[in-house]
Every structure is written in C-alpha cells, then in structure tokens.
Image (cartoon, rainbow, N blue to C red):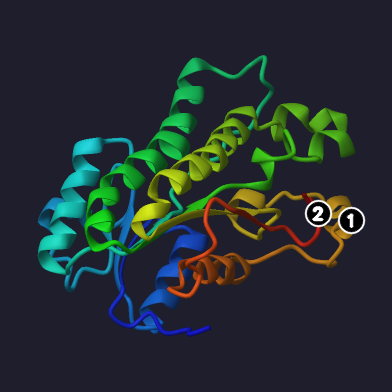
Amino acid sequence: MTTDFKGRIALVTGAAGTIGAALVTELRRRGANVVAADGVSGKPWTEADLRTEHMVRLNVTDRASIRGLVARTESQLGPIDLLVNVAGVVSFGSAEDLSEMEWDRVIDINLKGTFLACQSVMPGMKRARFGRIVNLGSIVGKNSGNARPWVDPTEQQRAGNLAYGISKAGVHAMTGFLAKELAAHGVTVNAVAPGPIATPMTTNFPDALKAALPVGRMGNADDVVTAILFLAARESSFITGEVLDVNGGMWCD
C-alpha cells in the first residue's frame, strides 16, 4: 500500500486538537494539500487564502459555513477527495444531572457537525467518482460508557458521559448509512473508534484501567492517525461502512 498522498486535497475538522494536529502534520508530510479547520483556532475561513493558510476557523454546526468552506476549497485548491471529521467535544456527569443545553452542545458538534461536513463534500466526490470520508467515533459509542464508574462507583458523576457516547454511537450508525448511499459513486465512508488515547480528554484516566489494557499501555495520536491513513488510502476501495477499533484490545467485536 502506498504511503503517498501527493496531490490529494483533504479537509480535516478538529485540526487543532491532539489527534487532528497529528493527522494534519502527517498528511502534509505525505504530500497532501490540507485545509485544517478548527472551531477555536485559526483565521476565519472567509478571510483565508487556503493555499497558504495553516489553520482556519470553522463552526461545524453551521451548514452555510461548512458549505462555504468546501466551495472556497474547490475554488482555490480543487475538489476535496478526503474528509476526516475529527471535531468533537466530551462531556462528563451523570445522566440525571445532564442539562438540555449540554446535551445539545455535544450532539450538535459531534453528530450534527459530522453529518453536515459529510453532506457538504458529497456532491463534489460524486462528480469526481472518488472520495474517502473517515469519521472519528469512539469505544464509548460501542460499550455504553467507559469503565471508570465501575472501577470506582464514586466517579459516576465525574466520568459518566452519556451525551458523548450517544453522539459517537450516532456517528457509527451514520457511517454505515452514508457508506451504502455513496458506494456506487466510488466514495467510501468509514469510522475509527479510538479507545483510551493519551489526550487532554484522558488526563485523569485511572492507573487501574491503564494496567488492564491488553497491550499494556494507552494509545497515542499516532495510533489513531495510522488507522485513519489506512482507510483514507486510494487502495482501501473495497472497505466501506466499517468502524475500525483502535483500543489496544480493550473492546473486541
């Protein structure tokens, strides 16, 4: 399998985070033209020259903004053939205390934002009869919540993550639906479901759970990037609708 992404045009959301930044760096190293978008960092996309700008600011929950950035990318760089949806937020606390505002925030960014980005690149990928979409899911979208509350029941308030888990389960399901809709157009849609990855979201991960991981360590951003690049490669044309686990053996299905 080639490791060369020369000439590929990629849009990466959540590009300022640990995983997003590592992905952008690796794609650029391999020759891709990358539009790195983030919700809090960078110049507003409406003011950016995408041929030279390192990072642009984008609200993934706003359809007009995403479609505008896609159109600007197509005008300045060419058709997008790779979309990686990394943008996401986490939320902790018990379901009983979860506010409607917090529920909406997490679902809007993690699920709605992923959908809007996918929807926005679909016409161009269909016209080109080629495209790769990779969404970022999570083990929490598969196992009905992380294991922390069961290690220490007093952590339920701090470690429960219902809204996050539901949003990622939705991303997994959406990936399958879009894969079937786009398969005949040469476009694959897959997801990567990380387990415990060393990022600012997991700074308080208990030592008891780290020790229980079959591979004996937490994952890192490069582990996730490797999986994304595999699914993003031209050669991965017969893989679509998959949710690829990257969790060190913590969850197998």
- Can residue 138 be seen in this snapshot? yes
Q: Position of residue 43 (x, y in %)?
A: 21, 57
Q: Is residue 21 toward the left or the right of residue 192 in the image?
A: left
| Disc 1 residue type (three-letter) | Ala
- The residue labelled by disc 1 is 212
| Other residues around mark 2 within 10 Å, as few (<14) / some (14–19) / many (≥20) | some
The structure residue drawn at horizontal position 51% and vertical position 54%, both measured from the top left corner, is 190
- The residue labelled by disc 2 is 250
CA gap, disc 2 and disc 1? 8 Å
Q: Position of residue 233 (x, y in %)?
A: 46, 73
The structure residue drawn at horizontal position 52% and vertical position 56%, both measured from the top left corner, is 240
Q: Is residue 207 toward the left or the right of residue 226 in the image?
A: right
Q: Position of residue 133 (x, y in %)?
A: 42, 56
Disc number lying in front (2 or 1): 2
| Disc 2 residue type (three-letter) | Met
Q: Is residue 1 above or below residue 126?
A: below
